[in-house]
Image (cartoon, rainbow, N blue to C red):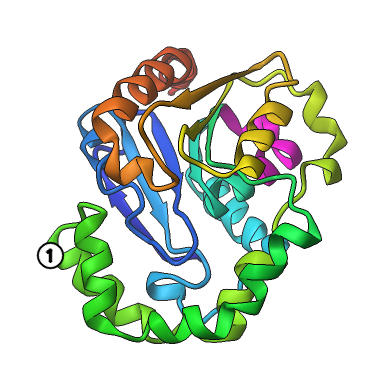
Amino acid sequence: MIHYDEYGDRKNPTILLLHGAGALDTFCQQYCFQKQFHLLVPHLCGAGESVEELYEPKKQMEALFELIRSLNKEKIGLIGHSLGAQLALMLICEHPECFSCAVLLSAWVNPTERSLKPYLRLAPMMAAMLHWKWLVRLQGRYWNYSKEQADYMAEYSRHITAEQYRAFFQYTVRLCDYPNYDSLRLPMLAICGSGEVRDMKRSLELLGRNPSCQTRILPRSSHDFPMRAADRLNPILLEFMKRYTQDSFKGEINNEP
């Protein structure tokens, strides 16, 4: 079973939080949702207790599905950021029956060889920089991590290899590989920051072609907006999650013996 962190009361509606590449506490500014929800944060490949595992989307999705089934809940909410949003897309396309709603934050789902090439070429240098504890701690604090969260990221990041870093981009999920996305009738919300790259905004447009997916551009924000712009993001997430998880949760209560 995949390792995960858990926040809040299990009796509340469950939300699965899928973090970005190598950044376990992407949702540090959303952990406050534990007052209303039961939060699960799986340690995805290349982060936390799964840092030494090579990222493979299909294998990762199977591990997440196993975790979801173990919850014995009719449906859960889903929020993913960046790489986590790509995994969220895979999950809702292959197992839509498991979810009451889904939020895709900065989901890059239309990669081109040209746009991927710089990340793949720079992988050895970027992985080496992740071994500098002082730099990783600084990044964590910039992201509003607690000291403990920043220290933990600095500790596990030194195990990330160039091969692992490259895998984050080598296996980027493509929306075109999931033609059933257009027919999904699941409440969805897709958001990207106003300061993000053109490919990310194009991805938002593509996701918005499904009439069940609302789209928004968060002003004055970049790719790290879950950590850096929580004051603007959190009210949006809370309103959406409360609206689309409550009915599912009530049904679960009514079905109790």
User: Eyeballing the image, is 126 above or below 81?
Assistant: below
Element class at badge 1 = helix
- In which quarter of the view is residue 32 placed? top left
The percent position of residue 245, horizontal first and vertical second, equals: 45, 20
The percent position of residue 12, horizontal first and vertical second, equals: 32, 29
Amino acid on which the number 1 mark rests in the picture? Lys
Residue at left offset 42%, top offset 36%: 15
Question: Do we see residue 65 in this rendering?
Answer: yes
The percent position of residue 7, horizontal first and vertical second, equals: 26, 46
Residue at left offset 27%, top offset 76%: 135
| Of the pair 33 and 214, the residue shown nearer to us | 214
User: Eyeballing the image, is 35 above or below 150?
Assistant: above
Q: Which residues are magenta?
A: 88-100
Residue at left offset 24%, top offset 36%: 34
User: Eyeballing the image, is 195 above or below 4?
Assistant: above
The percent position of residue 212, horizontal first and vertical second, equals: 67, 16
Give the residue at mark 1. 147
Residue at left offset 37%, top offset 41%: 225
Say whether residue 136 is left or right of residue 147.
right
User: Eyeballing the image, is 76 above or below 63?
Assistant: above
**In which quadrant of the rendered image does the C terminus lie?**
top left
Q: Main secondary structure of the magenta part?
A: helix
